[in-house]
Amino acid sequence: MTTRSEFESTYELEIIRPAPDTQNQTDLDPVKSLERLSSNNKQDTLAYLEREEVTEEGTSNVIEAEVPPPDGGYGWVIVGACYIITFFYIGSVYSFGVVLTRLKEDGLASSSTLSFAGGLTSAMISFLAIINSNIIKRFGSKAVLLVGVTILGLGEVLSGWTVNNIGGFFVTVGFVMGVGTSLIFMPCTLLPSQYFSRKRGLAIGIVYSAGGVGGAVLSLVLDALLTKYGPAWTFRILGFITWGACLPACLLIKERPGKRSAAFIEWSYFKELRYLTIFIAASLGVFPLFVPPFFLPLYGTSMGLSHSSSAGLAAGFNLASAVGRIAFGLLADRIGPINSLIIAFVTNAISLLLVWPLSGSVGPLIVFVILTGVAAGAFFSLMPSVVASIATPATLPSAMGMMVTGWGAGYLLGSPLAGFLLDAYGGTDKGLSAYRPAMFYAGALTIVSALLLIAMKWKTQSLKKRM
C-alpha cells in the first residue's frame, strides 16, 4: 500500500522527476515542473512524483504516477451539483429534530425511539460505506447518485403513510431513506477530491456547507408544512421537492479518469498509526454530533419557547454548521486538515461541557448553538480532506469507505443514548436539568477524540525528530 506524506499540502516537499522515457535527458527544474503540474491548461500531463514517507520503520521513497487535479474548471460545476444534492440529503437529517418534536407530541413514540429511527438513516451511511465505495468503482458516481436520490425521495414519500405506525416509520425513514442517503454520501464526499488539490478544503467545505444551509432552510420549511398540512403531507412534499431538485443535478456529474484500487478493503491501512488513530477518534467523535440538532427543538420547548422559535434554534445550528464547513475548509488549506480537526473537537467540547449546561436563557443558548454548529459542520467537511491527506487517489474510495464504516455506532446510538439519558433523568417534564447528563456524555466523548489526535500528532513529530 502506498500512502501520502504526513505533510498536509499535496505537492509540498515532493521531488518531481522526469518520466522514465526522459531519464537520459537533463533533470527538469523542480520549480518549473511544479508550475507545470499546477497549470489548468495541462491537466493531462502525467508526472512521476517521488514522496519521502516517515514511518515507524524508517524513511522510504515511493514512486507513483497520477494526474494532478485541475483545481478549478469543471470542478466548480461538480461542486455546484454536489451542493444541491447535499442541501437535501444532509439537510433532511439535520432538520429531523423539528419532525421529531411534532411526532412525539402526536404520541407516535418517545424521543429516544424516534431519535433511533432518525439515527438509523445516518447509520446506513456507515453500514453500507464499504459496499457503496465498491459499487461506485463498478458503476460510476453518476449512476449511483441517480439511484440514491430516487430511493431517498421514495422513502420520504412513503413516510407519509407511516407517521402513525412506528414500525413502518422505521422501515421508510430508517431503512429506505437510509439506503438512499448512503448511496449519495460517498460520491458527494469523494468527487471534489478528484478535481481539487490545493483548494480541496475549500471545495469540500462549500459542498458540505449545503448540509447546514439545507438543514436551516428545511427546519423552517418543515415547521411551516407541519403546521399547515400535518406530518403525512410534509413528508410527501419533501420527497417530491427532493426529486425535482436533485435528479437534474445528478446529470451534471462527470468523473475524472484515474487509477482505482481493485481491493475491496485496504486492510493494510489499519497497520498505520495515523489512519488507525484517526479512525478511532472519528468513530468516537460521531456519537455527540447529532445530539444538538436532534434535541435543540425539545430543549427549546422545555425552556418555554414556541414551536417556531424552537425550530429557529435548529435553523441557527444548521446555519452555523454551514459557516463552519467553509471556514474550516479554508483553515485546512492553511494549517492542514488534521490540525483543523483537533481545533473543531476542542471547540465542540467547550460548547457541550461549559456553554450548554449554563444555557438557561436564550442568550447563552444562542452562543452554544453557534459554537456547536460550527464545530459539528467542521467535522464533516474536514474528514474527506483528512483521509485524502493520508491515502492515495487509487485507494481513496476504499480508505474513506472504511473510515465511514467506523461511524456506524455513533450514527445509530449517539442520539438515542442521549435520549435514553434524558428519559432516565425525568424527561422533558423535569426541566432543563434533565438534559445535563446527555450534555456531559456528548462532551466527554468529544474530549477523548481531541486527545487521541493530539497524541497522534505528538507521536508523529517525535518520530520525525529521531530521523
Image (cartoon, rainbow, N blue to C red):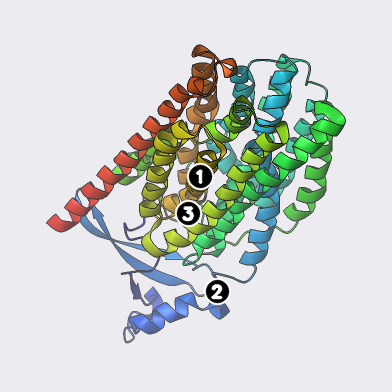
Image coordinates for residue 19, horizontal then vertical, percent: 40, 75
Verify CB contact (< 8 Å) between mark 3 and mark 1: no
| Residue wearing tag 1 | 367
Q: Residue at x 19, y 56 (%)?
A: 464
Q: Is any atom of residue 50 visible in this view?
A: yes
Image coordinates for residue 332, horizontal then vertical, percent: 43, 59
| In front of the other: 99 or 150 | 99
In the picture, the quarter occupied by the C terminus is bottom left
| Residue wearing tag 3 | 394
Secondary-structure class at tag 1: helix
Verify CB contact (< 8 Å) between mark 2 and mark 3: no
- Say which amino acid is labelled 3: Ala
| In front of the other: 271 or 221 | 221
Q: Based on the displayed image, in which of its 4 quarters is residue 292 positioned? A: top right
Horizontal side of residue 10 vs 192, given as left or right = left
Secondary-structure class at tag 3: loop
For marks 2 and 1, the one nearer the N-term is: 2
- Say which amino acid is labelled 1: Val
Horizontal side of residue 169 vs 398, given as left or right = right
For marks 3 and 1, the one nearer the N-term is: 1
Verify CB contact (< 8 Å) between mark 2 and mark 1: no
For marks 2 and 3, the one nearer the N-term is: 2
- Say which amino acid is labelled 2: Gln
Vertical side of 259 occupied by 12: above or below: below
| In front of the other: 153 or 371 | 371
Q: In the image, which disc is placed on residue 43?
A: 2
Distance CA(mark 2)–CA(mark 3): 18 Å
Image coordinates for residue 149, horizontal then vertical, percent: 73, 42
